[in-house]
Each structure stands twice: as structure tokens, then as C-alpha cells.
């Protein structure tokens, strides 16, 4: 029991040192001891171990008050890298974006690939090629227009994705942890992370691709609400009378957006509804919602935000979620 407790305490301490160094980037051992509230002896041991791992490295010496110059240590943000992949659309084709980021969320690689339609074999080949160029990648995050249930993509606006067991395939092939996230859930997470909104706010994101059905993400109390089997937000199943796989008339699209906002507001009363779309002009949608709202009788109305660049929030959310997967698990005593 004593050995187990000593091991747990060491893991807690080394993670504490790791987090402090990631935040301050450089520090001497005395500074690190002060910041972590750990003894200098403990810090000496942990810094030595982190240097041997390559997570810290010696930087430069700095003058001290009358004593010997102190050695500064620097955190190595390239110690672990993350591969972030996401599937989006561009001018009627599927756009695959592969991004490699370090622990500071700085980009070290980015490449885009277009496909007339999603091709599983080609997608896996892209991942393999990127991994072969960056040996420090320790996690793969993939954003998809769909939902995974028990490891299988069961619902997707991209029919080529349905039935694929992507997490199992990739973990078996490459031996790295893989997370797969719904595109709209990732986007609204990215939007809220960038805005640094209060956790008690309810934020809804609705994405209208140009040739696929819409999807919705629900952000509440600092996290995405996924519902049973992750199926919350599958608004393409609302009885709107729209065939999303064919072109939608401008007037019908605007009317449907307004009905969706009303439906969401009646059920969740969100603070904000973020609409991602490029189907119609922003002014036309704003005016239509104002007129629609004037005929409603509801106790509250959301602030409606129109954004024409879904990719920006989608990528920001996937990068944030994937980097979170690289955070060490919090070790706790039973």
C-alpha cells in the first residue's frame, strides 16, 4: 500500500510540475518549487526525469542574488504532437484537412485534400503519410459529419461514412488513441472556447451545408449535450418537409431556418443561436427572423448570430478537444 501511495503521489507531483511548466514555459528549479509548493528536493528529482524524457530541456543560466547562476529549464511544446483531421465540404466536394499541432496549439503541418466523395482507403492513407512524417504524434482527432454509436458511424449526412468503425480501424492500424467527434459539436465547442462564455449559458449551433442535411450542437454548463447514443441535434429528422439532398429554394430555406430557431427556443431557451450557412444573404435571413419573431409570443428570444465560415470554429473545436485528450489523467487516491 505504501509503495502504491508513493507511486500515486509521484504521478500527481510530476503532472503538477508538467502543467506549471506548460503555463510558464521557462523556470529555474527554485522558481518551480515556489510555483508548485513542492520541496526543492522533489522538484530536482522530477525535473531530472522530465529532462530525460525530453519534455523539459536546459535553456540558459540566469544571475542569482550573490550565489551561483541558476539554470533555467524550458518546456518542450513539441514533446507531443496531435494530428487533427476534419471532413468538410468545399464547392460541392469533400475537403479533408490534416493539421499537426503541438502542445501550445501551434501548427507544424497543414495539408488539404479534395475528394469528389469520401473514400475510406484514401483517408486512411493520408493519415498514414502524415504519421510517417511526424514521429511525435501521440493522438489522432477526427471531426466527421455524423455520430458514432458503439464504435460504428451509424448516422451521417455523408452516406459513405455509415457503417465504418473508424476508431477501431485506426487504433489497430497505427497504435495511437483516436477520438472521433461530430462536426457541429466540435464547432460550437470551438465557438464557445474562443468567446470564453460563461459556463451557465446555453449556446446552440446549427450548421447548414450546401449539399447535405443540417446538424445541431447544444452547449450547456460548459459541455456539449449529446443525448442518448449521441443523437441530440439530429435536426434533419424534424418534420420540415425539406429534401436536404436536393437544392432548396431560397424562400423555403429561410422559412425553415426561422422554424428551427423557434423550435429550439421553445425547448431549450438558449442565450444564443449560432447559424452557420452560405445559402442566402445574411440580411435576408436577419430581416426574415425579425418579421417572424414579431408574430411570435414567447417569453424570451435568443441572440441569433450568423456566421458564414463554419470551418474556422470546426477546426478550433477539434484542436481544443484533441489537445485535451493529451492531458494526463488526474490521479486520485481512493
Image (cartoon, rainbow, N blue to C red):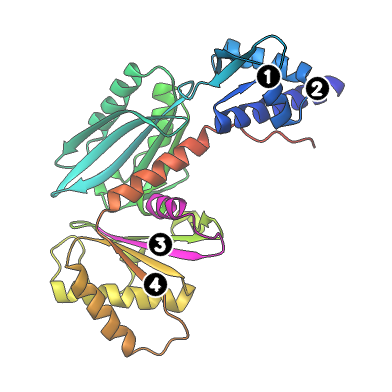
Would you say 178 lies left or right of 12 here? Answer: left
The answer to which of marks 4 and 1 sits earlier in the sequence is 1
How far from the left and from the top, in percent, is residue 146? Answer: 35, 50
Nearer to us of marks 4 and 1 is 1
User: Disc 2 and disc 3: Cα gap in Å?
Assistant: 46 Å
Measure how far apart labels 4 and 2 are at the Cα level: 52 Å
Give the mark toward the camera: 2 or 1. 1
Location of residue 83 in the rendering, given as x and y in whole percent from the top left corner: 38, 30
Residue at the spot of label 1: 29
In the image, the segment drawn in magenta is 186-208
Whether residue 145 is visible here, answered yes or no, is no
Q: Quadrant of the N terminus?
A: top right
Q: Nearer the viewer, mark 1 or mark 3?
A: 1
Q: Residues within 10 Å of mark 1 (few under 14, many from 20)?
A: many
Position above or below: 60 against 4: above
- Residue at 46% x, 51% y is 193
**Label annotation for residue 303:** 4
The residue that label 2 is drawn on is 6
- Can you identify the residue that label 3 sits on? 233
Disc on the earlier residue, 2 or 3: 2
- Which residue is found at the position 61% from the left and 31% from the top? 19
Sequence-wise first label, 2 or 1: 2
Task: Name which residue lies at 21% across and 63% down.
Answer: 244
Q: Nearer the viewer, residue 3 or 82?
A: 82
**Residue 319 belongs to magenta span:** no
Amino acid at each position: 500500500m505504501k509503495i502504491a501511495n508513493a507511486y500515486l503521489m509521484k504521478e500527481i507531483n510530476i503532472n503538477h510540475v508538467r502543467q506549471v511548466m506548460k503555463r510558464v514555459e521557462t523556470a529555474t528549479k527554485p522558481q518551480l518549487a515556489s510555483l508548485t509548493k513542492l520541496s526543492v528536493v522533489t522538484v530536482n528529482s522530477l525535473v531530472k526525469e522530465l529532462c530525460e524524457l525530453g519534455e523539459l530541456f536546459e535553456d540558459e543560466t540566469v544571475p542569482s542574488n550573490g550565489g551561483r547562476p541558476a539554470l533555467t529549464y524550458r518546456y518542450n511544446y513539441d514533446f507531443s504532437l496531435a494530428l487533427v483531421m476534419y471532413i468538410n465540404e468545399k464547392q460541392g466536394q469533400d475537403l479533408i484537412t490534416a493539421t499537426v499541432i503541438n502542445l501550445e496549439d501551434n501548427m507544424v503541418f497543414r495539408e488539404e485534400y479534395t475528394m469528389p466523395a469520401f473514400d475510406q482507403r484514401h483517408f486512411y492513407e493520408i493519415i498514414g503519410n502524415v504519421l510517417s512524417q511526424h514521429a511525435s504524434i501521440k493522438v489522432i482527432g477526427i471531426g466527421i459529419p455524423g455520430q458514432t454509436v458503439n464504435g460504428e458511424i451509424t448516422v451521417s449526412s455523408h452516406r459513405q461514412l455509415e457503417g465504418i468503425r473508424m476508431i477501431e480501424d485506426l487504433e489497430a492500424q497505427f497504435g495511437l488513441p483516436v477520438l472521433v467527434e461530430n462536426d457541429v459539436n466540435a464547432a460550437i465547442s470551438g465557438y464557445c472556447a474562443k468567446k470564453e462564455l460563461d459556463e451557465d449559458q446555453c449556446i446552440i449551433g446549427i450548421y447548414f451545408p450546401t449539399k447535405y442535411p443540417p446538424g445541431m450542437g447544444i452547449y450547456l454548463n460548459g459541455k456539449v449535450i449529446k443525448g442518448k447514443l449521441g443523437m441530440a441535434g439530429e435536426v434533419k429528422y424534424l418534420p420540415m418537409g425539406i429534401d436536404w439532398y436536393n437544392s432548396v429554394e431560397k424562400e423555403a430555406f429561410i422559412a425553415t431556418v426561422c422554424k428551427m430557431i423557434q423550435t429550439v427556443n421553445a425547448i431549450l431557451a438558449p442565450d444564443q443561436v449560432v447559424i452557420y450557412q452560405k445559402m442566402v444573404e445574411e440580411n435576408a435571413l436577419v430581416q426574415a427572423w425579425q418579421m417572424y419573431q414579431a408574430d411570435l409570443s414567447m417569453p424570451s428570444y435568443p441572440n441569433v448570430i450568423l456566421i458564414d465560415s463554419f470551418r474556422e470554429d470546426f477546426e478550433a473545436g477539434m484542436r481544443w478537444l484533441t489537445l485535451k485528450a493529451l492531458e494526463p489523467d488526474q490521479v486520485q487516491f481512493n
